[in-house]
Amino acid sequence: MNLVTLAQLIFLILRNLNFKPRKHELEDLAYAIAAYLLGVQVTKLGIPPSTLH
C-alpha cells in the first residue's frame, strides 16, 4: 500500500469518527500518520513540523 492510499484511508476513518482537530487540517494529520506507519521520514514530506507534536 502506498502513502497516498493509506493517507486517504486514514482520512476517511477519522472523518467517519467525527475527529475534529483544533490546530491542523484533518488531511495533514492523516498524511502524517500514514507516513509514520510506513516508516517514511516525516521531515521530508513538507508538512508543518508542529503537526508531529
Image: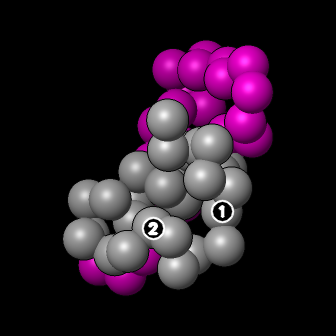
* Element under disc 1: loop
Q: Amino acid at mark 2?
A: Val
Q: CA distance from mark 2 to mark 1?
A: 8 Å
Residue 33 as seen in the image, left or right of residue 19 = left
Q: Determine which quarter of the picture holds residue 41.
A: bottom left
Q: Decide: marks 2, 1 in contact (CB < 8 A)?
A: yes
Type of colouring: one colour
Asked whether the viewer can see residue 11, the reply is no
Q: Which mark is residue 25?
A: none
Q: Which residues are magenta?
A: 1-26
Q: Is residue 48 magenta?
A: no
| Classed neighbour count for the residue bearing mark 2: other residues with Cα under 10 Å, few (<14), some (14–19), many (≥20) | some
Residue 2: image x %, image y %? 37, 81
Q: Amino acid at mark 1?
A: Ile
Instruction: Determine which residue is flagged by label 2.
Output: 42
Q: Determine which quarter of the picture holds residue 42.
A: bottom left
Please tell me whether residue 22 is drawn above or below residue 15 in the rendered image: above
Which of 28 and 15 lies nearest the eye of the viewer? 28
Instruction: Determine which residue is flagged by label 1.
Output: 47
For image coordinates 75% across by 27% down, the residue present is 23
Please tell me whether residue 4 is drawn above or below residue 49 in the rendered image: below
| Classed neighbour count for the residue bearing mark 1: other residues with Cα under 10 Å, few (<14), some (14–19), many (≥20) | some
For image coordinates 26% across by 70% down, the residue present is 38
